[in-house]
Image: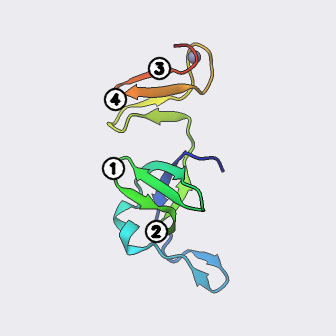
């Protein structure tokens, strides 16, 4: 697992995570189930998740799964391929809302 990574909040309510133990989605993160954001490792096992709508959650407060990062988004509804059409690297970055550029070619 490498951070930061894209992630999606999932509802783990009732899912068995160990014999006799069931996962429950904490009340605080329940309204955010299905949203996506960026998970960052702050150290000391603390994971901060910044949802695309600006909500901040912590890894201990919610259940989340990594999302494949073949695309990048600007958080305003636009999505691009993460692969540069010029050099073929996964190097495309959002430089501002509505604009992406390759970190290698430019
Ligand atoms: Zn490039």
The crowd level at tag 1 (other Cα within 10 Å; few <14, some 14-19, many 20+) is few
- Return the mark for residue 61: 2
Rendering coords of residue 98 (x, y %) = 34, 26
Of label 2 and label 3, which has the lower sequence position?
2
CA distance for labels 2 and 3:
34 Å
Q: Which residue is mark 3?
A: 101
**Which of the two residues, 84 or 105, is positioned nearer the viewer here?**
105
Residue in the picture at 54% in, 76% down: 23
Rendering coords of residue 3 (x, y %) = 59, 47
Residue in the picture at 34% in, 55% down: 55
Using the image, determine if residue 76 lies above or below residue 54: above
Of label 3 and label 1, which has the lower sequence position?
1
- Return the mark for residue 97: 4
**Which of the two residues, 44 or 89, is positioned nearer the viewer here?**
44
Q: Which residue is mark 1?
A: 54
Q: Is mark 2 within 8 Å of ligand 1?
A: no
Of label 2 and label 4, which has the lower sequence position?
2
**Which of the two residues, 43 or 21, is positioned nearer the viewer here?**
43
Rendering coords of residue 41 (x, y %) = 56, 53
Using the image, determine if residue 36 lies above or below residue 102: below
Of label 1 and label 2, which has the lower sequence position?
1
The reply to whether discs 1 and 2 touch (Cβ–Cβ < 8 Å) is: no
Quadrant location, ligand no. 1:
top right
């Amino acid at each position: 697992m490498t951070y930061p990574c894209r992630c999606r909040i999932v509802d783990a309510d009732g899912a068995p995570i160990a014999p006799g133990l069931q996962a429950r989605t904490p009340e605080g993160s329940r309204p955010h189930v299905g949203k996506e954001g960026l998970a960052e490792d702050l150290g000391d096992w603390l994971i901060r998740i910044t949802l695309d709508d600006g909500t901040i959650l912590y890894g201990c407060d919610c259940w989340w799964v990594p999302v494949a990062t073949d695309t990048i988004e600007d958080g305003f509804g636009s999505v691009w391929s993460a692969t540069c059409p010029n050099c073929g690297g996964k190097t495309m970055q959002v430089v501002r809302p509505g604009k992406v550029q390759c970190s290698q070619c430019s």
